[in-house]
Image (cartoon, helix red, strand yellow):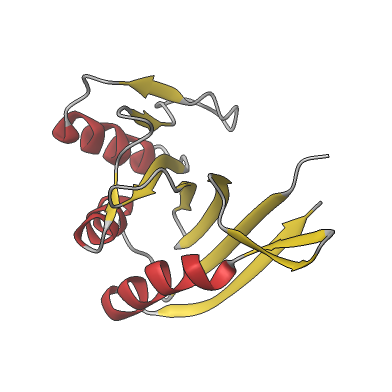
Amino acid sequence: MATTSNIRIYLVGTTPSSKIIDNLMANGWQLNDQGKISYLPLGDKDNYDWQIQQDIDYLDLLKIVKNKELNNEPVGIIMSWKNTAIGISIIIRKEGTLSIDLNINRQDFALNDHYKITDFQWYLKRLLPCLDDAFGVESFSCEQHR
């Protein structure tokens, strides 16, 4: 059975998804899913039918993001940390909630010979400071299911 891990971050107030994405990019996160850009398309209706494109331009992606917000749709993107293969899938909801799946080369550590857990600290120190400085973090939670 696969392990799933996620972080949910609640921002203070409502913030446009494009500003959240720009902030993450300014702090080490990249729109990179194995050399491509992955996002949820306009009209996805919670199907989570990720689109993977190599040739989409950032401005075109921002148009999709803004249209999704106008339609009250969650914005979804896949990002990786700097020049690593460690990535996250982020769903940004209008009310300022980020649901972050730690599903691409998840960082973990062994508690003993038979039990590994997600290294939430690795992710939190790369997410919380930049989000809190820019927007304010009201609360966050971490979960792992195995």
Taking 24 as reference, is 89 left or right?
right
Could you say where residue 9 lies in the image, as x and y percent from the top left? 52, 67
Height in image: 140 above or below 116? below
User: Is residue 20 depicted above or below 101 in this figure?
Assistant: below
Residue beneath the point at 38% across and 34% down = 33
Q: Residue at x 26, y 59 (%)?
A: 28
Q: Quadrant of residue 57?
A: top left
Q: Closest to the observer: 111 or 15? A: 111
Can the viewer see residue 13? no
Which picture quadrant has residue 29? Answer: bottom left
Q: On the image, which quarter does residue 36 sit in?
A: top left
Give whichever of 101, 139 is nearer the camera. 101
Q: Position of residue 129 (x, y in %)?
A: 35, 78
Give the percent coordinates (x, y) of residue 23.
24, 61
The relative height of residue 115 versus residue 125 in the rendered view (above or below) is above
**Residue 126 image point, x, y percent:** 38, 68
Residue positioned 40% across, 32% down in the render: 39
- Residue closest to the far front: 113
In this view, the residue in front, 52 or 69, is 52
Would residue 45 be seen by someone viewing this image from the given angle? yes
Answer left or right for 77 relative to 82: right
Quarter of the picture containing the N terminus is top right
State how many labels appear. 0
